[in-house]
Image: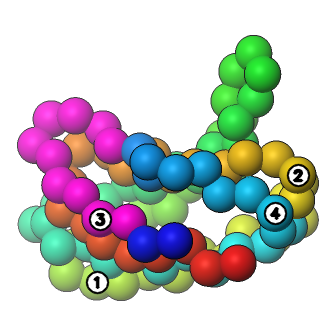
Amino acid sequence: MTFSGQAARSNLYTNKLFTGSSSYKIQMSNSHSTQLKVELYKKGFWYDSLVTTYYVTPGYTRYGYPSGLDHSADYYLLFYAPSNFSGYVEY
């Protein structure tokens, strides 16, 4: 699943949930001039749970390898503004 976006003031989310695996490879490229903050969340019935947080230096690409996850749960990424990013989630 690929993703990309940019925003001056609004936080952005992946527009699709990902599920079906207990581990993922996440690539995050930051094209903005400020540090990018990315959070991985597990979708819940009453509330969503923060799994981990990544920080990506301006002009760089970072990889995340979350593991030990619930393969039947839905997950998504939250990108904090300001942002200009791209990347992918691989199962």
Q: Which mark is in front, 1 or 4?
A: 4
Callout 1: SS: loop
The quarter holding residue 87 reads bottom left
Disc marking residue 83: none
Whether pointer 1 and pointer 4 mark residues with C-beta atoms closer than 8 Å, the reply is no
Between the residue at mark 4 and the residue at mark 3, the CA separation in whole angstroms equals: 22 Å
Query: Residue 13, percent across and down?
Result: 41, 45
Identity of the amino acid at label 1?
Tyr
Give the mark nearer the N terminus: 1 vs 3.
3
The quarter holding residue 9 reads top left
Give the mark nearer the N terminus: 2 vs 1.
1
Quarter of the figure with the C terminus: bottom right
- In the picture of the structure, the residue carrying the numbered disc 1 is 60
Identity of the amino acid at label 2?
Ser
The residue at 60%/50% (across/down) is 17
The residue at 32%/77% (across/down) is 29
Between the residue at mark 4 and the residue at mark 2, the CA separation in whole angstroms equals: 6 Å
Between the residue at mark 2 and the residue at mark 1, the CA separation in whole angstroms equals: 32 Å
User: Left or right: 76 with respect to 85?
Assistant: right
Whether pointer 4 and pointer 2 mark residues with C-beta atoms closer than 8 Å, the reply is yes
- In the picture of the structure, the residue carrying the numbered disc 2 is 72
Whether pointer 2 and pointer 1 mark residues with C-beta atoms closer than 8 Å, the reply is no
Query: Residue 83, percent across and down?
Result: 20, 55
Look at the image and give the residue range highlighted in magenta: 3-12
Between the residue at mark 3 and the residue at mark 2, the CA separation in whole angstroms equals: 25 Å
- In the picture of the structure, the residue carrying the numbered disc 3 is 4
Whether residue 32 is visible, yes or no, is yes
